[in-house]
Image (cartoon, rainbow, N blue to C red):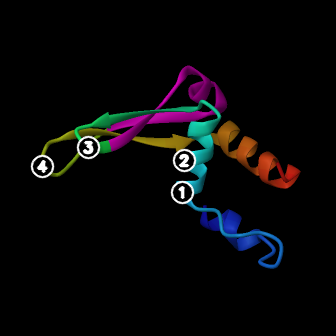
Amino acid sequence: MGQINELRDETAMKRLTIKSLEQWLTETGCFDLWFMGNSPRRRPTALGEEFGIEAEKRISEKGNEYEVYFLNEDGQRRIVERLLSGK
């Protein structure tokens, strides 16, 4: 995200945030929104996996398992193409 923000023209484009990217990926059907208690959670859909979202299981220092999501190279390329298209 930082690299994209460094390359932008500040007069023409706002900073890209993780929150805005997650929102767009949810709106386009790449993430499914669900709740654990009162906390919203996201997980990639089949479309999201096709787009380039990958999940990686990790274990916290306390021994709790959790997943982190990241965009593979294809997903990153698609995000940059979308930004360049202005859509």
Q: Earlier in the sequence, mark 4 or mark 3?
A: 3
Q: CA distance from mark 4 to mark 3?
A: 22 Å
Q: Magenta span covers which residues?
A: 40-57
Q: Which residue is mark 1?
A: 18
Q: Which residue is mark 4?
A: 62
Q: How many residues crowd around disc 4 within 10 Å: few (fewer than 14), some, or many (20 or more)?
A: few
Q: Report the mark closest to the observer, 1 or 4.
A: 1
Q: CA distance from mark 1 to mark 4?
A: 26 Å
Which residue extends farthest top?
46
> Residue 74 in the image: x percent, y percent?
69, 37
* Cα–Cα span, label 1 and label 2: 6 Å
Q: Indicate which label's residue lies in the foreground, 3 or 2.
A: 3
Point out which mark residue 34 bears: none
Which residue sits at x=51%, y=34%? 54
What's the residue type where badge 3 is placed?
Asn
Q: Name the residue carrying label 3.
A: 38
Q: Are marks 3 and 2 in contact (CB under 8 Å)?
A: no
Residue occupying image coordinates x 56% and y 35%: 53
- Residue at image location 71% in from the left, 47% down from the top: 79
Mark 2 is surrounded, within 10 Å at the Cα level, by few (under 14), some (14 to 19) or many (20 or more) other residues, namely some
Image location (x, y in percent) of residue 78: 74, 41
